[in-house]
Image (tube, rainbow, N blue to C red):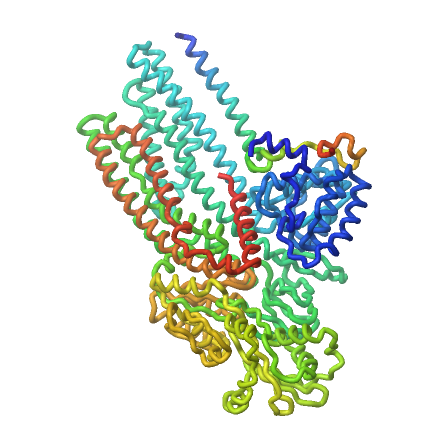
């Protein structure tokens, strides 16, 4: 069970890395707006002012 | 609707479900009430088809749909959206919101032209572009943010747009060489969104965002530590029962103790900080026992871990910190939401000043950025942005919000003018003597700002009890610690002390009152009731007397002429004279004349020696004859009135119209001969009778306080007494069937000063004096009453004088408010009781050693959450207790529009908070 001396710190370090990533997300403002992004992914980018129609998913 | 459906219909926006409904505006969805839609649609359709064929792959089915627009604004917006090829907006909107998205009129401020002058921080990025965050007005749902973000590629030089729904702001990145925020704002205003700088209120908003992030960080760290220390605790317990090497056990204990220690000093440090601050300030705070418990637990655990024996509590410590942080966050959210609602209200009323530089150049600045000695220009119809001295021009101003004086006051060069006054007539230039927070406006808005942190008597009581409680708990814990340590050893002593300190939860006590009040304020805002001062809720819970203003409060306040009894050829002369007055009666008469005789030109009449008398009328020479229009003098007019009474219209349809109105007669004399009479009416609000009846059933006394003549006030009071009037004679005689509402008093003919005096006197006789009036000329009385409720006027003005403002003008909101106040106070009492019982029981259990620290740690947040739940479930603004809303149906199309607007706003407010 001496592996505990190595495994435990590693486990906590790994978890700590995840925590740091989470903190980075929070600090960079990714959680500030929980409403708009959920809708944003549903919207296709429509090419505007290019050859109209051909690749417009809203077209006929 | 599932996401699949949603995505599918996004790809097929022309599908049946997405077609605009008939008789609804294609753009905003409001019902259109056009008389002849065909004439409206022919022109815009051609235009849109033109536009569409040039720019987008227009789908034939779209243009074949019946297009309908409620106004030119919507038509323009529709054309613009088409032009940009963004029709998917409509399908997305229909997906996301069943409610309508009305388009705001273009109220773009010029302040964006010079962001530096406006004090907006602009960030210059490395590639030469600029980044700025601006407030967006008119943002309602996700479709709006989609539309704004999708407009970006259409504006050259606009690099990026990111809408943040939570505080209705937009982050722009643009190339200053190719475009400007002004141009972008112009473009956005065409589709109904206006941009404005985030003013000082919003600065606080953004710091709120930072605080929120810190809360998230704290919770994340606390969760990490709690989760890890918990599985270490599990291995320890497992090891205890199955046996493990002492060296491993010691290792686990040290790691666990370190985790608990970190939990106490990183996420838990806010408790130590507040506790320390409260000790330094000498005010006991709920965080003192919490910090003490954490400290004792941490030290005990560390000692236990290092010495290798004795119990350690690191897992309970870490989870305690985690749960406490969650509680703090929930509390913060509740307060933040109220703040957002308020700041949105304030944002609508921001004032922009037009500053004249030394070289004569004009620039727009928000009023709070003005400096002393700046010169500003104030055009007619604008609000004076700061206190100052007039240096150029002469005009009349309205200072209603300061003095309650409803008449305009003349103003000349050299006179002082107070910020917030409304310029009536001519442009003036003002040298600023006090701006921003030093001005009278500034000081008043500070009042509003402070109100959210104000401590009402109930909260103060809670604070006092909480303070005593804190010391009692600390005393008890010391006794417990010493006692148990002496008799059973250190381990036991620490155990019980930590249990006691953790489980004793004054939070329930100290949290409940502010929480219930905050929750109620938030719900009130959702119901379109803005409350500046939490004290009102406690005061409104105790019935007293309510004084109602008449015009604009019990009635709609828009006067119109019901009947004219006299020669028609005199009307142009009357209009010519009345065009010199801005009195509502004069306006009503003017409108009536122009309606009847649209072709007349009042300018060709020579009018001079015009003289207005407050409450009496207007007199002057029109084309060589002396004309007098006004209220009959009782001493002189009796005989004439009698002779005319018989000639008053007896047309049945008129009589019905009059019976719903509050009537007033205005007589006309030419060269002292009585020649005619106007019947002028004002409609009663349909919900008035019901609301008054409800208030009376709650134990309130009702009274009427009007600036109008006594007989008019009597007539209104009589009508509301329950009877319906059947003929004109009844109205003049004041006959009504007595039933329902009973008036304690009915005072007419009161000047603002008299109203003030009456309110002052009434405060000595009744426990609670409430004044309901408009924010225009009742301000003094509103401010003087125990609780002032403003129902009309600008929000800025009203909130300044009355702690409660109801912008929807709906009287039934008062009934809801009274109800909510009673429930609020009841809710607070319930929380107090529950908290006291809980604490007495748990503390005695903890002292006697029945509660393990771990159980205590679980109980502590549970008790806090119970209080939260009780506070949230306090029955404020619940639907069941409200008087029925049938009057809305009676009210017809205006009512339904108002309702849709109302729910739109409430959604806006709800979307402001993501919990």
Tell me: B886 left or right of B596: left
Is residue B749 visible in the rendered image? The answer is no
| Residue occupying image coordinates x 63% and y 74% | B587
The x, y position of residue B686, in whole percent, is 49, 64
B117 or B46, which is in the foreground? B46
Quarter location, residue B893: bottom right
B88 or B388, which is in the foreground? B88
> Is the residue B843 above or below the residue B700 in the image?
above
Is residue B883 visible in the rendered image? The answer is yes
- Picture quarter with the N terminus of chain B: top right
B754 or B698, which is in the foreground? B698
Tell me: B525 left or right of B25: left
> Is the residue B63 above or below the residue B454 in the image?
above
Residue furthest to the front in view is B652
The x, y position of residue B668, in whole percent, is 61, 85
Residue furthest to the left in view is B487
| Residue occupying image coordinates x 36% and y 36% | B291
């Amino acid at each position: 069970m001496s592996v505990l001396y190595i495994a435990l710190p590693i486990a906590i370090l790994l978890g700590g890395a995840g925590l740091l990533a989470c903190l980075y997300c929070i600090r960079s403002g990714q959680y500030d707006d929980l409403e708009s992004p959920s809708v944003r992914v549903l919207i296709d980018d429509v090419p505007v002012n290019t050859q109209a129609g051909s690749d417009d998913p809203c077209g006929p | 609707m599932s996401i699949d459906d949603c995505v599918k219909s996004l790809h097929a926006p022309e599908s049946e479900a997405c077609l605009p409904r008939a008789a609804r505006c294609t753009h905003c969805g409001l019902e259109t009430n056009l008389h002849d839609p065909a004439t409206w649609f022919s022109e815009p359709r051609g235009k849109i088809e033109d536009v569409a064929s040039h720019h987008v792959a227009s789908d034939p089915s779209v243009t074949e749909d019946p297009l309908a627009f409620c106004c030119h604004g919507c038509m323009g917006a529709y054309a613009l959206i088409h032009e940009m090829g963004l029709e998917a907006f409509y399908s997305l909107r229909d997906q996301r919101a069943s409610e309508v998205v009305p388009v705001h009129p273009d109220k773009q401020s010029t302040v964006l032209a010079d962001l530096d002058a406006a004090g907006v921080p602009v960030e210059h990025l490395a590639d030469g572009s600029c980044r700025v965050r601006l407030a967006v007005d008119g943002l309602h749902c996700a479709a709006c943010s989609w539309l704004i973000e999708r407009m970006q590629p259409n504006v050259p030089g606009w690099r990026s747009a990111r809408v943040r729904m939570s505080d209705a702001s937009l982050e722009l990145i643009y190339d200053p060489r190719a475009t400007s925020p002004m141009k972008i704002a112009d473009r956005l205003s065409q589709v109904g969104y206006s941009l404005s700088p985030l003013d000082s209120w919003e600065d606080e908003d953004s710091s709120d965002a930072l605080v929120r992030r810190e809360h998230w960080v704290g919770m994340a760290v606390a969760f990490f530590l709690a989760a890890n220390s918990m599985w270490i605790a599990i291995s320890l317990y497992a090891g205890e029962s199955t046996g493990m090497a002492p060296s491993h056990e010691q290792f686990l204990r040290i790691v666990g103790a370190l985790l608990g220690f970190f939990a106490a000093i990183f996420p838990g440090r806010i408790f130590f900080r507040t506790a320390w601050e409260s000790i330094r300030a000498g005010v006991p705070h709920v965080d003192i026992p919490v910090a003490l418990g954490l400290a004792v637990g941490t030290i005990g655990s560390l000692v236990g871990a290092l010495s290798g024996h004795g119990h350690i509590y690191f897992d309970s410590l870490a989870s305690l910190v985690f749960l406490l942080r969650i509680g703090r966050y929930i509390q913060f959210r509740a307060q933040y939401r109220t703040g957002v609602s308020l700041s949105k209200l304030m944002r609508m009323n921001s004032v922009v000043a037009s500053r004249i530089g030394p070289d004569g150049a004009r620039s727009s600045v928000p009023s709070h950025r003005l400096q002393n000695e700046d010169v500003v220009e104030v055009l007619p119809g604008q609000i004076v942005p700061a206190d100052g001295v007039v240096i150029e021009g002469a005009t009349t101003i309205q200072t209603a919000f300061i003095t309650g004086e409803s008449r305009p006051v003349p103003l000349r060069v050299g006179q002082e003018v107070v910020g917030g006054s409304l310029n009536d007539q001519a442009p003036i230039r003002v040298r600023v003597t006090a701006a921003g927070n030093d001005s009278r406006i500034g000081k008043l808005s500070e009042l509003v700002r402070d109100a959210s942190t104000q401590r009402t008597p109930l909260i103060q009581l809670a604070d006092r009890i909480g303070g005593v409680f804190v010391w009692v708990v600390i005393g008890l814990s010391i006794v417990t610690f010493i006692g148990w340590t002496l008799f059973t050893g250190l381990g036991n002593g620490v155990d019980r002390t930590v249990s006691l300190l953790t489980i004793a939860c004054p939070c329930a006590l100290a949290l409940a009152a502010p929480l219930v009040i905050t929750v109620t304020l938030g719900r009130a805002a959702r119901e379109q009731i803005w409350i500046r001062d939490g004290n009102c809720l406690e005061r409104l819970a105790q019935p007293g007397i309510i004084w109602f203003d008449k015009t604009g409060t019990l009635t709609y306040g828009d006067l119109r002429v019901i009947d004219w009894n006299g020669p028609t050829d005199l009307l142009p002369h009357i209009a010519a004279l009345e065009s010199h007055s801005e009195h509502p009666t004069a306006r009503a008469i003017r409108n009536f004349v122009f309606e009847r005789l649209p072709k007349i030109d009042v300018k060709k009449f020579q009018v001079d020696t015009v003289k207005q008398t407050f409450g009496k009328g207007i007199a002057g020479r029109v084309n060589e004859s002396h004309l007098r229009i006004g209220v009959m003098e009782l001493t002189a007019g009796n005989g004439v009135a009698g002779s005319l009474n018989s000639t008053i219209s007896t047309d049945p349809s008129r009589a019905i119209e009059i019976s719903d109105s509050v009537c007033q007669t205005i007589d006309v004399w030419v060269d002292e001969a009585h020649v005619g009479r106007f019947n002028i009416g004002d409609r009663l609000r349909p919900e008035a009778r019901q609301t008054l009846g409800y208030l009376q059933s709650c134990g309130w006394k009702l009274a009427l306080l009007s600036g109008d003549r006594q007989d008019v006030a009597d007539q209104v009071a009589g009508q509301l007494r329950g009877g319906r009037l059947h003929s004109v004679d009844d109205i003049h005689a004041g006959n009504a069937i007595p039933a329902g509402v009973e008036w304690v008093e009915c005072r007419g003919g009161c000047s603002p000063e008299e109203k003030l005096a009456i309110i002052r006197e009434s405060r000595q006789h009744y426990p609670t004096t409430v004044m309901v009036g408009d924010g225009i000329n009742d301000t003094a009385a509103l401010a003087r009453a125990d609780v002032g409720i403003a129902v009309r006027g600008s929000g800025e003005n009203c909130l300044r004088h009355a702690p409660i403002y109801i912008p929807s003008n709906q009287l039934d909101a008062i009934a809801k408010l009274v109800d909510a106040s009673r429930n609020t106070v009841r809710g607070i009492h319930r929380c107090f009781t529950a908290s006291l019982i809980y604490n007495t029981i748990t503390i005695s259990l903890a002292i006697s050693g029945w509660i393990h620290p771990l159980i205590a740690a679980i109980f502590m947040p549970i008790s806090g959450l119970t209080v939260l739940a009780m506070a949230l479930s306090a029955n404020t603004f619940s639907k069941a207790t409200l008087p029925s809303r049938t009057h809305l149906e009676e009210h017809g199309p205006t009512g339904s529009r108002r309702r849709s607007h109302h729910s739109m706003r409430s959604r806006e407010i709800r979307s402001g908070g993501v919990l």
